[in-house]
Image: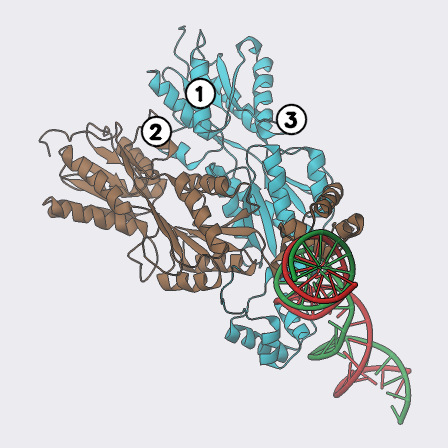
Chain colours: A cyan, B brown, C red, D green
DNA sequence: GTTCGATTGGGTAACGGTACCCATCGAACA
DNA sequence: TGTTCGATGGGTACCGTTACCCAATCGAAC
């Protein structure tokens, strides 16, 4: 009912007729398979160009590949994901593969539905960015389709992993603050709704590392964590909560730049100055962090490379690699003006 | 070669066998078509649940629908797009349709490839957000598949449009600044690379309206436009360019919040205060604008509604509507502390 | 008791590609 | 000269689902 008189698409048979060859020959040409002479090949290519033929992915998918790779993102609000996608697109460019994205949402259930939507659409492989799913679940998916996981730390033989070394990153931040002389360092972390949370979710690693480094420096009594969200609003709420403490922290390590931005707003609203009254650090080194009026100390984790590598690993798996690969990028502390020594000996 | 021993998917035939019916009957159930008794229907549904059957979109696409709608976004860096997607997802939820997104990029060529990628993947319809394509081109696409365009103003009988009334929005900003007493009001606009730029691109409308309102108030001599990009970097560069002028503007209207954020950075770097020395306004009313330390006057354009309506219009078209629909949301000025009267009588 | 229409269910040919296998042919080799 | 072999090209059976049409059944109406 939907289709009125939309004109019929050009098919492989039309091309074959036009070039006076079989559909098999045309198929070989578009797949870049061999078994066609250069002369025939170029005749077919001419016909393809002339008729404006483009293969239909759905039909290809029923026997072979769709040349489509699926990307699951929790949402698109985090600019860090944009870096990842840019890297991915760079790698895919010229390979004939097309990336399609779906929103995974904030719950495991929604994420599962998103992954299934991709499986049902016959993608050749899936890249899952910062998934909430359990390792078991991911291994199930990996059994069905090549699978690459970003920003999770588990070791699995079933899928590939690309991640930032969040332990090192969090260490860098906390040690930076300690070196500056801070003792009352607080942390803003992310709340996920998973019942049995995999310990390898990045926000958990950042939070645990924060606690560990505090303990290692004899600061276990100063540990203070606000559990909100990695978002502007979450950072705002988290910082307000932390600022109510007495004595209040002299530094806040927000687990993500977006939360740090929100924290800056709360601090500003409270009439405090950054960094004179309180230091603040983010994580991700997004574009915003570098702006002179924000000037946020952060951790750079090269999302571009992560996206590029994820693309490479996935294509390798699609081509047949079965042994698991892992790739981690080294985080770098980018100290800016939002962190400084604490106000000298005050409450 | 790619597929090792991935286990075979459950197909409609498996379900039919398990429920002792024909594949036709199963097909009817999953399509919610009639021609099956309630008893048979529930027996089939039980079999589907037991076997964990999910229809394969590729196969469905060869005869009927894929229950997939494609969304083309220029990129995912603009948080305003996230609002649109949230609205879209809200409308799609429970309809059985799945949205997939592809990146349209910054050039017409890339955007065309993205749209074709969706057509080749047999989506049931396409939503194109802020396209660069010509009206002609879009009408071609609309001939092939239901098509809804966001954030473009042309009237077409071939596709539906959902847009913010950018004329009104830009008027609101410029008149707000004029009422405050500003005369030297500058504008930061977006550079696209199109040769023959459709006049209905939103950034062109905002820029043209700015000029018109300036003229209407006898301020044609004060018109000053920096053509960079709707991005943090673009706003930064644009503001630096504008600040070099002598006398410098007392207000800057950035065509998008992201650019306004960058402009704030440049102003801060120049040692100027907002709004005492210079007023600044954005457009889009993103989350950042509302943060107390940014506090940016902006224009709210309800992306959530736009996404919701776009989804509704597209599904209506898929269901068979052929007469074009248009929907515009009314922008609202949100005055915050980044705009104030100009510094009194100075150079 | 026959006819009729509505309801339920199934058979089957597509849809547009690809995988697999076979036929042909000329050249190289024994 | 006959055989083998690689290169080229084609025939055809699928892949999983739906559209279309037909068959069987059954109750109601005549």
Quadrant where the image shows the N terminus of chain B:
bottom right
Asked whether the residues under marks 1 and 3 belong to the same chain, the reply is yes
Q: Chain of mark 1?
A: A
User: Mark 2 packing: few (<14 Cα in 10 Å), some, or many (20+)?
Assistant: some
Asked whether the residues under marks 2 and 1 belong to the same chain, the reply is no
The residue to which callout 1 is attached is: A237
Quadrant where the image shows the C terminus of chain B:
top left
Q: Position of residue B39 (x, y in %)?
A: 72, 45
Which of the pair C10/A14 is nearer the observer?
A: C10
Residue B218 seen in this snapshot: yes
Which numbered dot is residue A197?
3
Is B43 displayed left or right of A177 in the figure? right
Q: Position of residue B103 (x, y in %)?
A: 48, 50
Kind of element beneath mark 3: loop
Quarter of the figure with residue B337? top left
Which of the pair B309/B132 is nearer the observer?
A: B309
Q: Position of residue A31 (x, y in %)?
A: 64, 66
| Distance from Cα at disc 1 to Cα at disc 3 | 23 Å
User: Mark 1 packing: few (<14 Cα in 10 Å), some, or many (20+)?
Assistant: many
| Distance from Cα at disc 3 to Cα at disc 2 | 33 Å
Quarter of the figure with residue B193? bottom left
The residue to which callout 2 is attached is: B290
């Amino acid at each position: 009912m939907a289709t009125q008189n939309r004109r019929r698409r050009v098919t492989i048979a039309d091309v074959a007729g036009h070039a006076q060859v079989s559909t098999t020959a045309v198929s070989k040409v578009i797949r870049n398979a061999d078994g066609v002479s250069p002369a025939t090949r170029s005749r077919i290519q001419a016909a393809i160009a002339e008729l404006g033929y483009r293969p239909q992915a759905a039909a290809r998918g029923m026997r072979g590949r769709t040349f489509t790779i699926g990307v699951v993102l929790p949402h698109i609000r985090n600019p860090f994901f944009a870096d990842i996608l840019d890297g991915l697109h760079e790698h895919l460019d010229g390979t004939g593969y097309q990336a399609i994205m779906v929103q995974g949402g904030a719950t495991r259930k929604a994420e599962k539905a998103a992954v299934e939507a991709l499986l049902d659409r016959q993608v050749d492989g899936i890249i899952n960015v910062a998934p909430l799913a359990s390792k078991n679940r991911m291994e199930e998916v990996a059994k069905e389709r090549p699978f690459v996981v970003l920003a999770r730390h588990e070791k699995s033989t079933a899928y590939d992993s690309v991640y930032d070394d969040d332990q090192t990153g969090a260490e860098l931040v906390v040690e930076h603050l300690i070196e500056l002389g801070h003792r009352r360092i607080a942390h803003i972390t992310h709340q996920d709704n998973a019942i049995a949370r995999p310990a390898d979710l990045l926000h958990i690693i950042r939070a645990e590392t924060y606690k560990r480094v505090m303990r290692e420096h004899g600061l276990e009594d100063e540990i203070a964590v606000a559990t909100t969200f990695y978002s502007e609003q979450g950072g705002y709420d988290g910082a307000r909560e932390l600022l109510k403490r007495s004595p209040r922290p002299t530094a806040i390590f927000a687990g993500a730049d977006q939360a740090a931005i929100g924290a800056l707003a709360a601090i500003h609203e409270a009439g405090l100055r950054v960094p004179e009254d309180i230091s603040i650090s983010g994580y991700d080194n997004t574009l915003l962090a570098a702006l002179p009026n924000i000037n946020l100390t952060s951790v750079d984790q090269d999302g571009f490379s992560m996206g590029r590598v994820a693309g490479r690993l996935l294509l390798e798996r699609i081509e047949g690699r079965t042994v698991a690969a892992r790739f981690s990028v080294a985080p770098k502390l980018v100290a800016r003006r939002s962190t400084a020594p604490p106000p000298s000996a005050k409450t």
